[in-house]
Image: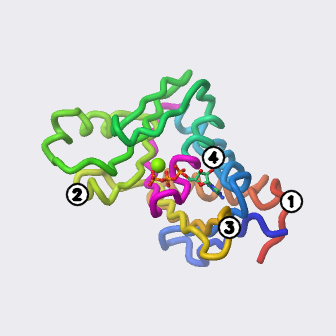
Amino acid sequence: MTHVTILASPNPKDAQHARFVWRDEQGCARTAGALAQALSLGLHQGGSAVIELRGTLGAGKTTFTRHLLRALGVEGRIKSPSYAVVESYELPGFTAQHFDFYRFNDPQEWEDAGFRDLFAAPGLKIVEWPEKAAGLLPAPDLYIDIDMSATSDTERTVQMAARGETGRAALTAMQASPSPAETGGSSHD
Ligand SMILES: Nc1ncnc2c1ncn2[C@@H]1O[C@H](COP(=O)(O)OP(=O)(O)OP(=O)(O)O)[C@@H](O)[C@H]1O
Ligand SMILES: [Mg+2]
């Protein structure tokens, strides 16, 4: 069974890339768990990470975020921030913020709502629909693009790209042992 496939960029000087195949939500949860592990130490040490999630409506951006936040220790309900634009979670050691800019259409709100300050602070920032706040958001450490399969309700093809030290370190850690592919008991394509 193939749950997850990882292809590393051959040139370490390029932005680093990885490709995953999620057969179902469990595959999504495994990748989210691996990413949580990869980010955890840096976040606890006062670091910052910005993750952009792209993909059509219903691709799984919120689902992935829920698994990621759970794996980082968030308890209780994890609401989709589609109306509030941002939901914040205080964890022991760092803050995580989950943004959804789908309904964001007034650049003035960026200043008024204090988003500039939120992005300037340390901690984890996960962003759904970053394209709706283009030009305002800082460059992300990690891009995650979730593509729905034409043939299966639950399969997703996921491209990740890392830039900068934080993103690359996270992606490298995910690709190291134990890899999501191995923990998933799957084989490579
Ligand atoms: N492999 C999978 N990975 C993630 N979600 C999956 C998968 N297979 C099925 N799903 C389901 O697909 C749905 C994804 O919905 P979700 O709200 O996460 O999408 P979204 O990308 O956040 O959409 P929106 O753009 O509306 O915010 C959920 O019901 C989830 O259970
Ligand atoms: Mg969503």
Residue 34: numbered disc: none
The residue drawn where x is 41% and y is 48% is 127
Instruction: Tell me the amino acid under the disc marked 3.
Output: Val
Instruction: Return the residue at label 1.
Output: 185
State which tag comes first along the sequence, 4 or 1: 4
Residue labelled with disc 3: 21
Q: CA distance from mark 4 to mark 2?
A: 28 Å
Determine whether 40 is above or below 7 in the image: above
Number of the label disc, if any, that sits on residue 135 = 2
SS at mark 2?
loop
Q: Name which of mark 4 and mark 2 comes first in the sequence.
A: 4
Closer to the chain start, of discs 3 and 1, is 3
Q: Residue furthest left?
A: 108
Mark 1: few, some, or many residues within 10 Å (few <14, many ≥20)?
Answer: few
Residue 62 on image: x %, y %: 52, 47
Residue type of the residue flagged with mark 1: Gly
Q: Earlier in the sequence, mark 2 or mark 3?
A: 3
Find residue 103 and report its horizontal and vertical position in percent. 29, 48
Q: Earlier in the sequence, mark 4 or mark 3?
A: 3
Q: Tell me the CA gap for discs 2 and 1.
A: 41 Å
- Residues at marks 4 and 3, CA–CA distance in whole angstroms: 19 Å
Disc 2 residue crowd, few under 14, some 14–19, many 20+, Cα 10 Å: few
Q: Quadrant of the C terminus?
A: bottom right
Q: Secondary structure at mark 4?
A: helix
Q: Residues within 10 Å of mark 4 (few under 14, many from 20)?
A: many
